[in-house]
Image (spheres, rainbow, N blue to C red):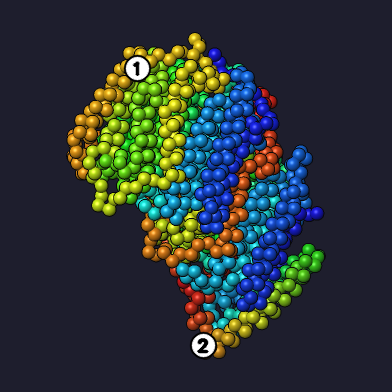
């Protein structure tokens, strides 16, 4: 069964269906969109259960169709463990976002945004889902590029038409930043095709094709800058707070939860494997940028007055962790980074959604406009606290596992740079406690502010939105093994093609012994 | 003698000991998810789960002592947590089971007490769910067979502590105190986390078995570094100097919380960590152990000094808790004998300090939640049960002969003096201070004349609150003697922490330090009598000397934190935000504005006259053609 | 032979170009554009004949088709502008500018 083409096609068809509905059938549009996204989720889960854990092959469910034969461009799709969990993340988040955005385009809510076309919004959401699945599934570099750029379009319209007061500024900034990176990447893609000289864009055949270290460096930079903007790494980050703050909550979830992960995913998949030597040469630079990002994002987050901007800055800090894990090049760190991408999608997604619920009720994103919400809406505040705690990587919640793995995996590289970075990165846990708890305190604790005194607690729809996320956050916090079992073989493949091996943690203690002692 | 080897275990009650953690966790989950539906019976479920956990602990304990001494360290594997890195499992040995019994036993009593104490609070169900959550996390902390599991429990109790300190979160002071506790603890956790990383890279394992029974001989420097990092973690959790400041603020929580978390159990986790890792990272005479001893000594004096000046009964007790944990930390730095006395003191302290806190809670309950001791006085008639139980707790903590505290604290002092005279005599001095501040508390609360607020009508608390008090005071009387005499506890603990080389030292009641301690305690109590018992206590606090202010302001700990970390931190944040908006983003926006300006100028070329466009096209075509010709000719 | 045709083609093109540049009446400019297109057609056909294949003739037909389509659209625009503004001068229609 051609799982991946179906997964890409289904939301596209759904989007067309939603858009083709007659005018005025807003309710039907929402229901159809939700149904389509649930079908995609079901298909994804069905595919995931058939995923062969120990086949030894690089990609599963491979499908390759010739697309532009004269340039060797293929519509090539396939997944390994890393891609699979990212696709699953997208498939889980989209129905949640659709349900959460139920009234985002209606023009209701205290924020009083103008009424917009409802069916266009949900149609865009489904198109975006197709693009997200496509970009993770692509095994052809050119196809990856196409999806990478095409993703921008629905998101641009979602921010630009359905966002907050400064939506057009934010949307244009988002588009220009991403496009700039994307064009650098296009140059690098073409140059890769030319220098590899294999007349193909298929990723597996391009591994090891570029050997000249100088060329590798330039191509690496082309790809890396695009991904660093997408992720975003410091100092390419300033579009994210604007975009995330202006986007409607649901779009912000997908933006930060999935779209940005394409950046870190691309670093792991393309930058490392296509240009291993350059990746090693640039490792110190990337690690330093990541550490700056971790601390800087956290400090700036502390100083924010706008809830959504604050969450966006925490994400910049978290992306620092992910990039650090990717470039630490140990199996722990990379598996941790991959898991981090998934967990961050859930925890930050939950935070954005709850911020959205609060803003929908109160009509303001300013933290100071709240106070004492816990007393008025305990369920809302409780969900806020749990997702916040996941954001600060509390053990027992999912982010802890990934942060722990990234840090220990970086620390295990017994070199000054890595050890120092891991220690500085670990100090992020203190800063995380400050920004999350301080925000929570100002929003939910203290005497109840006049303006929130009539606030309603979560209704059934909102509970349905947030419950699966919280279940995933807690479940993966205690039992991450199923996901890690999927990720680990893929990470081993990556490390093999980069040509690095884990150093045993102790001199004189081999891998086998270490495993025995760890059990 | 070395500690016994850890053996894998399956089946039996020990194999099911995870129920100890699972039951209260289930209770917490039911109460939190059930919401208001569970309001009516929520507290009963909370108590039931805690008691069930206690029963499992007791049965486990008996199964454990049924085993021969050398086989009493059983590892129970549970599940693979992070493949290749961490496996979850429990270690049931004399040390962990002692803690489990303390946590579930005292914890259950405090659960029962809370039924009465929180009976009028609309959030009682939520309170019990948090208490259950705490018990589960604390049990995970002490029962886990590896450092990562310990860390999870460690932060879990931090969360429970955060939730419970901020239980009355609508009070800004409570919300702030909760936040402060969590953040200060995170500073300690930072050290613990890096310590765990280093343990893994050094030993290739994070299990206690992998570390303690490792055949590797790492460099001493690495071991010391790990020890110091773990000590930083311990300082955070156990409110030791320099991370002590959160504990006094933590008294914003309901009093049962202060008794359970901030006196009897959670704050002793640091001592557990040091003792658990003692054989490898804090061996007698090592640098790390010396640091632990110094931290303990400084804290025991600091806590006592703070306790001496506080008028808030709970803050006084909090200072006392700091001080007593200082003793434990000090004791834990001196090998197997020290471990036994430190843990022994920890257990007896769990009883008498919980007793004192719950007594204080009973007083507050009677006095409309008044905490200022200057508004108490002459309460011994009004609250007889509370008074007598409090008195027993008081006698136990100051080390009155033959009561619990006497045996364990004296043991610590004797052990320390044997190894390090300076620290030992400072500990003796601390005991004298204890005699003063605890006597002051008793005199101000129960003796003297009435200084009550006008609307105060003290009444004895209901039985559900006094019975736990009575049970705890029974423990406060007899437990110490039972544990210490004949070296019973030291022998029991031996398989877990090792036995002293020369066998169990005999108990000598009449040594110089012992007598000196008693004398100093008597002097302290006498001074307290002269100042607070014999003469009337003013209702408003006198200004006091510089030293009094120093102690009242918590030795300027908060002021120090504020000027060293908070203010510069705020500045840094402001600068960073400014830099981000104007610097990084300014650069981007500046670039955008530059391009915009240039194109604004360039667009003037678009005149709207179609024919001039045509001319420029022609011109362009001519240039292209010319260029082609030129290139063709070259 | 070829040269003569090409010279004629160039002359026609130049006349057309000058006409576009100097005349104001939209209809005349339009005719000049057609002249330029036909100059190109002539060149195409000439080269086709010289090379002995049909490519140039083929393209000439394409140009004619495009020109015809262009005439349809262009004249419609001019007529509409004339109706609303009572002028066929391209210099009067200069609103589409910065």
Q: Nearer the viewer, residue B517 or A11?
A: B517
Would you place residue A447 above or below residue A423 in this image? Answer: below
Q: Nearer the viewer, residue B87 or B332?
A: B332
Q: Circle 2 — which element? A: helix
Q: What residue is pinned by disc 2?
A: C85
Chain letter of mark 1 equals B
Q: Answer left or right for B378 relative to B210.
A: left
Return the x and y of residue A273 as percentages of the image width and height.
Answer: 66, 40
Toward which corner of the image does residue B62 lie, by quadrant? top right
Q: Answer left or right for A180 relative to A68.
A: left
Return the x and y of residue A42 as percentages of the image width and height.
Answer: 72, 57
Q: Nearer the viewer, residue B303 or A3?
A: B303
Chain letter of mark 2 equals C
Is any atom of residue B315 visible in this view? Answer: no
Q: Answer left or right for B595 relative to B549.
A: right
Tell me the crowding category of disc 1: few under 14, some 14 to 19, or many 20 or more residues within 10 angstroms, Cα based. Answer: some
């Amino acid at each position: 069964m051609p799982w991946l083409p179906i997964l890409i096609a289904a939301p596209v068809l759904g989007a067309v269906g939603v858009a083709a509905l007659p005018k005025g059938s807003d309710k039907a549009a929402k229901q159809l969109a939700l149904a389509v996204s649930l079908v995609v989720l079901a298909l994804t889960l069905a595919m995931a259960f058939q995923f062969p854990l120990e086949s030894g092959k690089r990609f599963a469910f491979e499908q390759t169709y010739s697309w532009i034969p004269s340039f060797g461009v293929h519509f090539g799709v396939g997944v390994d463990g890393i891609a699979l969990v990212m696709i699953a993340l997208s498939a889980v988040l989209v129905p949640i976002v659709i349900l959460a955005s139920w009234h985002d385009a209606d023009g209701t809510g205290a924020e009083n945004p103008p009424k917009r076309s409802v069916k266009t919004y949900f149609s865009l959401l489904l198109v975006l889902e197709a693009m997200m699945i496509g970009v993770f599934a692509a095994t052809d570099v050119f196809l990856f590029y196409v999806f990478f750029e095409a993703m921008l379009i629905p998101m641009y319209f979602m921010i630009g038409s359905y966002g907050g007061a400064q939506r057009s500024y934010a949307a244009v900034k988002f588009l220009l930043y991403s496009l700039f990176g994307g064009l650098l990447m296009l140059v690098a893609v073409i140059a890769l095709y030319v220098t590899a000289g294999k007349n193909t864009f298929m990723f597996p055949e391009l591994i090891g094709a570029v050997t000249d270290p100088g060329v590798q460096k330039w191509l690496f930079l082309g790809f890396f800058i695009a991904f660093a903007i997408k992720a975003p790494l410091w100092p390419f980050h300033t579009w994210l707070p604007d975009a995330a703050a202006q986007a409607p909550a649901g779009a912000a979830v997908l933006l930060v939860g999935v779209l940005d992960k394409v950046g870190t995913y691309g670093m792991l998949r393309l930058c490392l494997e296509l240009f291993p030597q350059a990746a090693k040469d640039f490792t110190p630079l990337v690690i330093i940028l990541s550490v700056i990002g971790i601390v800087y994002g956290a400090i700036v987050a502390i100083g924010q007055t706008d809830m959504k901007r604050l969450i966006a800055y925490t994400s910049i800090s978290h992306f620092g962790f992910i990039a650090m894990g990717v470039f630490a090049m140990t199996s722990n760190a990379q598996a941790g980074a991959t898991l981090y991408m998934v967990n961050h999608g859930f925890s930050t997604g939950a935070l954005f959604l709850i911020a959205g619920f609060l803003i929908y009720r109160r009509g303001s994103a300013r933290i100071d406009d709240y106070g004492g919400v816990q007393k008025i809406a305990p369920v809302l505040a409780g969900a806020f606290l749990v997702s916040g705690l996941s954001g600060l990587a509390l053990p027992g919640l999912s982010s802890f596992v990934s942060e722990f793995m990234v840090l220990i995996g970086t620390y295990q590289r017994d070199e000054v740079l890595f050890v120092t970075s891991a220690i500085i990165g670990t100090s992020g846990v203190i800063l995380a406690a400050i920004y999350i708890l301080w925000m929570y305190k100002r929003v939910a604790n203290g005497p109840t502010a006049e303006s929130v005194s009539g606030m309603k607690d979560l209704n059934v729809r909102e509970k349905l939105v947030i419950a699966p996320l919280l279940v995933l956050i807690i479940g993966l916090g205690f039992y991450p093994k199923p996901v890690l079992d999927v990720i680990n073989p893929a990470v081993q493949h990556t490390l093999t093609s980069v040509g690095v091996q884990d150093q045993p943690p102790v001199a004189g203690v081999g891998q086998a012994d270490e495993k025995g002692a760890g059990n | 003698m070395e500690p016994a080897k850890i053996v894998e275990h399956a089946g039996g009650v020990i194999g099911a000991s995870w129920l100890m953690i699972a039951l209260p966790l289930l209770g917490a989950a039911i109460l939190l998810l059930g919401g208001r539906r569970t309001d009516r019976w929520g507290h009963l479920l909370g108590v039931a789960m805690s008691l069930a956990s206690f029963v499992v602990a007791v049965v486990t304990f008996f199964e454990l002592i049924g085993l021969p001494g050398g086989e009493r360290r059983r590892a129970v594997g549970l599940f693979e947590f992070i493949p290749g890195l961490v496996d979850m499992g429990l270690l049931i040995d004399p040390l962990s089971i002692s803690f489990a019994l303390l946590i579930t036993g005292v914890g259950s009593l405090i659960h029962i007490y809370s039924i009465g104490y929180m009976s009028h609070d609309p959030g009682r169900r939520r309170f019990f769910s948090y208490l259950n959550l705490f018990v589960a996390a604390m049990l995970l902390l002490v029962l886990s067979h590896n450092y990562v599991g310990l860390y999870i429990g460690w932060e879990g109790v931090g969360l429970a502590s955060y939730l419970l300190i901020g239980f009355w979160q609508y009070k800004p002071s409570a919300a702030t105190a909760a936040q402060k506790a969590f953040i200060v603890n995170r500073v300690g956790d930072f050290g613990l986390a890096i310590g765990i990383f280093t343990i893994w890279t050094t030993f290739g394992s994070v299990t206690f078995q992998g570390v303690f029974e490792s055949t590797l001989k790492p460099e001493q420097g690495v071991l010391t570094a790990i020890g110091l990092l773990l000590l930083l973690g311990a300082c955070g959790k156990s409110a030791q100097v320099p991370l002590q400041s959160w504990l006094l603020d933590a008294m914003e929580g309901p009093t049962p919380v202060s008794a359970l978390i901030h006196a009897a159990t959670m704050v002793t986790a640091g001592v557990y960590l040091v003792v658990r890792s003692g054989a490898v990272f804090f061996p007698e005479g090592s640098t790390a152990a010396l640091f632990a001893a110094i931290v303990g000594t400084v804290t025991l004096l600091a806590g006592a000094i703070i306790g001496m000046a506080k008028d808030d009964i709970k803050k006084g007790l909090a200072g006392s808790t700091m001080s007593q944990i200082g003793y434990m930390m000090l004791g834990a730095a001196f090998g197997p004998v020290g471990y036994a006395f430190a843990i022994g003191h920890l257990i007896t302290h769990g009883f008498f300090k919980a007793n004192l806190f719950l007594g204080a809670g009973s007083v507050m309950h009677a006095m409309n939640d008044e905490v200022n001791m200057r508004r108490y006085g002459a309460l011994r008639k009004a609250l007889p049960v509370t008074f007598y139980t409090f008195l027993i707790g008081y006698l136990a903590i100051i080390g009155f002969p033959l009561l619990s505290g006497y045996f364990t604290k004296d043991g610590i002092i004797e052990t320390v003096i044997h190894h390090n005279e300076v620290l030992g005599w400072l500990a003796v001095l601390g005991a004298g201070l204890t005699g003063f501040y605890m006597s002051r508390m008793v005199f101000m609360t129960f003796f003297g004349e009435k200084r009550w607020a006008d609307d105060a009508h003290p009444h004895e608390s209901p039985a559900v609150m006094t019975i736990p008090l009575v049970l705890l005071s029974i423990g406060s009387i007899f437990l110490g003697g039972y544990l210490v005499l004949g070296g019973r506890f030291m022998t029991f603990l031996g398989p877990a922490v090792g036995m002293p080389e020369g066998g169990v030292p005999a108990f000598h009641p009449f040594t110089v330090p012992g007598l000196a301690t008693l004398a100093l305690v008597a002097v302290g109590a006498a001074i307290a009598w002269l100042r607070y018992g014999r003469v009337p206590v003013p209702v408003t606090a006198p200004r006091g000397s510089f030293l009094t202010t120093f102690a009242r302001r918590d030795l300027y700990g908060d002021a120090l934190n504020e000027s060293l970390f908070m203010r510069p931190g705020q500045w840094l944040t402001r600068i960073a935000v400014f830099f981000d908006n104007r610097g990084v983003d300014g650069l981007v926006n500046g670039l955008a504005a530059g391009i915009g300006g240039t194109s604004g100028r360039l667009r003037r070329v678009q005149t709207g006259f179609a024919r001039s466009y045509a001319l420029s096209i022609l011109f362009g075509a001519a240039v292209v053609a010319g260029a082609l010709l030129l290139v063709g000719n070259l | 032979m070829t040269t003569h045709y090409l010279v004629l083609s160039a002359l026609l093109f130049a006349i057309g170009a000058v006409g576009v540049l100097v005349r104001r009446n939209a209809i005349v400019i339009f005719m000049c554009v057609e002249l330029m297109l036909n100059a190109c057609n002539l060149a195409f056909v000439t080269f086709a004949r010289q090379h002995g294949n049909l490519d140039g003739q083929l393209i000439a037909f394409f140009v004619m088709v495009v020109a015809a389509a262009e005439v349809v659209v262009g004249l419609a625009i001019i007529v509409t502008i004339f109706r609303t503004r009572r002028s066929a001068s391209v210099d009067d229609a200069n609103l589409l500018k910065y």
